[in-house]
Amino acid sequence: MALRGTLRQLVRTKDVDDVIHQNDADPTEEGHHAKLDRRLTSWDLMGFGIGIVIGTGIFTLTGTQAKDNAGPAIVISFLIAGVVAVLAAICYAELAAAVPTAGSSYTYAYTTIGEIFAWIIAWDLILEFALGAAVVARGWSGYLQHALDLPHAFFGETDSTVNLGAVLIVAIIGTIATIGIRESKLVTNALVVVKVSVCVFVIVLGIFFVKAQYITPYIPPSKPLDPKSQTTGLEQPLWQWITGVDATAFGFTGVLIAAAVVFFAYSGFEAVANLGEETKDPAKDMPRGLLGTLAICTLLYVMVCFVLTGMVNYTDLSEGAPISDAFSQVGLGWAGVLIDIAAIAGLTSVILVDIVAMGRIGFALCRDGLLPTRIGAVHPKFRTPATITIVTSVAVAILGAFIPLGTLAEMVSIGTLFAFLVVSIAVVVLRRTRPRMKRPFRVPQVPILPITSAVACVALMSNLAIETWLRFLVWLALGLVVYFVYGRKHSRLGTSGKNARDTVGA
């Protein structure tokens, strides 16, 4: 009986109506606010979404994957990754419009499959956004070092002891995220205008230098990998270990491998769903913000990839700075300066949205009692979850300062895909458990489309290395320790009386 009771506690769920109305009551203690201000429109949401999606992917992954795996067909790789992201976005749109909340997929899991699974998702999202922000912060520091010829010991990637550039940008961005969502919105939108303008510039100027000879054959014939490039042991993709098939480069297999890698370029758009409580009309704005983000980003990705592989032979692409180097190869080196500016703007906005998203996830966890409620309190002046934003910013700064994150970047992808998987399942579960729930936006062809989304996520996850899966499992195990030591005992859903009515910051 005791075991049955414990299991019942682990899978207890929040009522959807309680989630929707959880901020209707006024705060009970002076100096704290349970509510986040509703200040965002669908255009603002698209600004945040584009701000986090267009970053390292378009400026680096295009060259690497075209050269190593897909050739000119890198366009198809980005389309495949984009389709998987869109399928997940459609599922996100239904839940985000019906249940607008700061916790996004964490709260969706809490209302469908239970508290412990919701905690796992939140823990996973913290990893995704924190690691992503730290990786990008180090990349930003590298661009700064290259532009200003700063010392490698403090701004480089491989030779640095303490990466001061990463600490600097995280400190600045963390301050902006703490001060307010309006300030974050203004900064993000300004950076988005810069990098989207430069992407359009690349497409419009580069299209005149595209040559048919560089995109023929469009999908280079498959060939065995060089023995030195073969991955074995824990470094090999999961699917390769299961099937025992030798990996190949190029061909359609190469296109699929590249799709799994460039999916990183789409990661982070789900941060938009974390802004549901700060959206003026979430029923309309959330679907528009999510789907609009991916539509714009996919179009830009595809066009930039087409121009890039059409300007120069894919075998001659630079792996470090493919776009600016391609313009240099056709005699337009001056364009590289503008592209570098766009890269810096792109990386800055990614860090900002990552930190904003982490603050909202922490706010949701604290409000539910799974983390100490006081650190999730909304600041009376800034109207943001200031303390949790500062805490997460410090953590990102430490990661960016001391840890070369290289191969750990794959963990961002596995974390994103895992969250997408849960959201896809949640749509099907809620359709059965809450068939009459008001859904301003509905996923078509349920359960076919959500199941397709879930299968696609698993397929891409199988292309990630075994060691990435092991690191991911270790992180989840650490999260379970935190949950059983603190979260399960302090969960508001599991308490009664006065404690069950407490709000964050009370």
Image (cartoon, grey):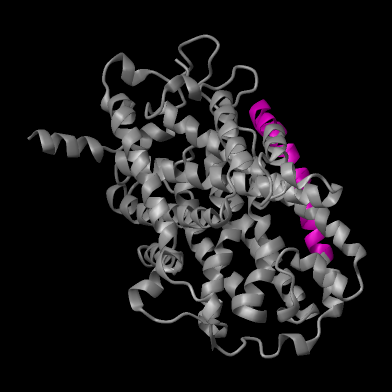
Counting from the top left corner in percent of width and height, residue 119 is at 37, 39
Query: Residue visible at 74% across and 70% down?
Result: 318
Q: Quadrant of residue 445?
A: bottom left
383 with respect to 467 (left or right): right
Query: Residue visible at 53% across and 28% down?
Result: 388
**Magenta-span inclusion, residue 159:** no
8 with respect to 14 (left or right): left
Which span is picked out in magenta? 174-201
Quadrant housing the C terminus:
top left
Quadrant housing the N terminus:
top left
- Front-lying residue, 105 or 311: 311
- Front-lying residue, 182 or 471: 471
- Front-lying residue, 54 or 334: 334
Q: Is residue 230 visible?
A: yes
Q: Residue furthest left?
A: 1
Name above or below for residue 243 compared with residue 319: below
Q: Residue furthest top?
A: 30
Q: How many discs mark residues in the rendered view?
A: 0
221 with respect to 440 (left or right): right
**Magenta-span inclusion, residue 181:** yes
Counting from the top left corner in percent of width and height, residue 226 is at 55, 82
Q: Is residue 14 visible?
A: no
Counting from the top left corner in percent of width and height, residue 32 is at 53, 15
Query: Residue visible at 46% across and 26% down?
Result: 23
Query: Residue visible at 84% across and 49% down?
Result: 149
Name above or below for residue 80 compared with residue 281: below
Q: Main secondary structure of the magenta part?
A: helix
Counting from the top left corner in percent of width and height, residue 487 is at 33, 30
Name above or below for residue 83 compared with residue 172: below
Q: Quadrant of residue 99?
A: top left
